[in-house]
Amino acid sequence: MITSQRMAAIDANAEALGVPRKQLMESSGNAIARVVRQLADPGDAVAVVCGRGNNGGDALVAARFLERYEMTVHLLGRPETITTEITRENWEAIVAAELDATVVRDSRTFDPGEPDLVVDAILGTGVTGALREPERSVVDHLGDLDAPILSVDVPTGIDPDTGDRLGGGDGIAIDADHVVTFHDRKPGLESLDAAVTVADIGIPRAAELFTGPGDLLQLDRRPDSHKGENGEVLVVGGGPYTGAPTLAASAALRAGADLVRVACPDLVAREVQAFSPDLIVRPFPGETLSPVHVDRIGELAADHDAVVFGPGLGDAEATLEAVHAFLDQFEGRAVIDADALEVVPDVDTDATLVCTPHQGELRGMGGPGADDWETRADLVSEFAAELGHVLLVKGQYDVVTDGENVRINRTGNPGMTVGGTGDVLAGAVGALLSVLPPFEAGAVGAFANGRAGDSAYDDAGNGLVATDLIDRLPEALRTDE
């Protein structure tokens, strides 16, 4: 089972792995044609009704393989408004082959005749809102036909993730008899009274298992959003160290958080503030975090979308007691890093945690060790299930898991063994945790942090330092889609 958003990410990751969308469209079209052959006899009338996106492009490919049928192709909308290059190429191939193709500029001219089978490829996944014209009238017309309908990926007008009609109860949708969907079932198909065929179109397992540029597609910011709506992050750290909390806080800003505040001891507050005017410092008395500060930290944390807890705190006994006390009462979202990690297995917390240990810190938490990444992924997944928290275990191959799902990150390089890159990662994940589900925040954060490190390595080689990653995070989080 796979959501439409995750499917879009996998498509993009497959392309990054060298499997172009055009190739996937060819495979999808072949899959549609195979199902048509199962449902219709040679010589039957088949009406292929296409939208102007990739869903329509899949069906245009199928039409090339269906010349044994009395086939008509109906493109809804002007060809010059086709939304993707590969769909445009397949439309031009239909025209060049002189197949029976009609452009429907006005729904009143739509006439599929009396087909024995209709292929619905009007709208696929990624569509929101009620249908508009000409799609609405065309769908209404198809509903009046006696012919069975085969929908491509999802029936037009149906939300692929919920099975509800787009636009609510008054929305109009195709009442499909059959659906051919790709790679995996979509959740919304479960509630439909339709036969579903899941077609393997050659997407490699790596596109789903390994992080890639497609994972960045879920990062979206509304044009009308306002300050604070895209994440407010509190970094709790410092005392023995000043660099770690400032690196984490600066990374959170560069990873998209609107506001970042640093709660740190008075002893280092001035140095942290001097690092950047973009940081807001909330000092607490003393030289290190201790239990007397927990109530104040809890009050601050309650006003933030996510907390990054641990960078530079140190491992003094009183500090670890404070970490335990904080987690015992905290119910929000937090990234736990550095010395604070060893407390996690011993505390029963209602907080939602993303823990970011390296292999040594994982063993300190009671977790497993393994040399090869595949074995490590299995073992770490089991440990995450026991903990009840997301783990992002850093290494040559980062393992991200919530105990059920696993994603592996391969970005990064040996130059990133320098101190501070883990603090940058923690801050970036904190910003992402403000706007994404915890597992996704860990996966996207690992990918972007490693991508920023790879960019820095191109310039500085093994001489890169952690601050080199921070300014590269915005580009590392950018997608070309």
Image: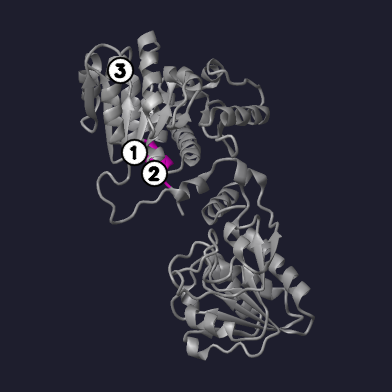
Label 1 Cα crowd, 10 Å radius (few <14 / some 14-19 / many 20+): many
Q: Which residue is mark 2?
A: 435
Say above or below: 192 vs 98.
above
| Element under disc 1 | loop
**Where is residue 358 shown, x and y percent of the image?**
52, 22
Name the amino acid, label 2: Val
For mark 3, what is the residue? 242
**Above or below, comparing residue 219 to residue 286 in the picture:** below
Label pair 2/1, CB-CB below 8 angstroms: yes
Front disc: 2 or 3? 2
Residue 467 vertical position relative to residue 16 in the rendered view, above or below: above
- 423 left or right of 119? left
* Residue 305 badge: 1
Of residues 3 and 54, the one nearer the viewer is 3
Q: Mark 2 or mark 3: which comes first in sequence?
A: 3
271 in magenta: no
**Total count of labels:** 3
The crowding category of the residue bearing disc 3, from other C-alpha atoms within 10 Å (few below 14, some 14 to 19, many at least 20), is many
Q: Nearer the viewer, residue 195 or 424?
A: 195
Which dot, 2 or 1, sits closer to the camera? 1
Determine if residue 78 is in view.
Answer: no
* Residue 476 is a magenta residue: yes
Residue 347: percent from left, percent from top: 46, 22
Pick whichever of labels 2 and 1 is earlier in the sequence: 1
Q: Tell me the amino acid under the disc marked 1.
A: Asp
Distance Cα–Cα, label 2 vs label 1: 8 Å
- Sequence-wise, the earlier of marks 1 and 3 is 3
Q: Image quarter for residue 291?
A: top left
User: Residue 222: x percent and y percent?
Assistant: 33, 54
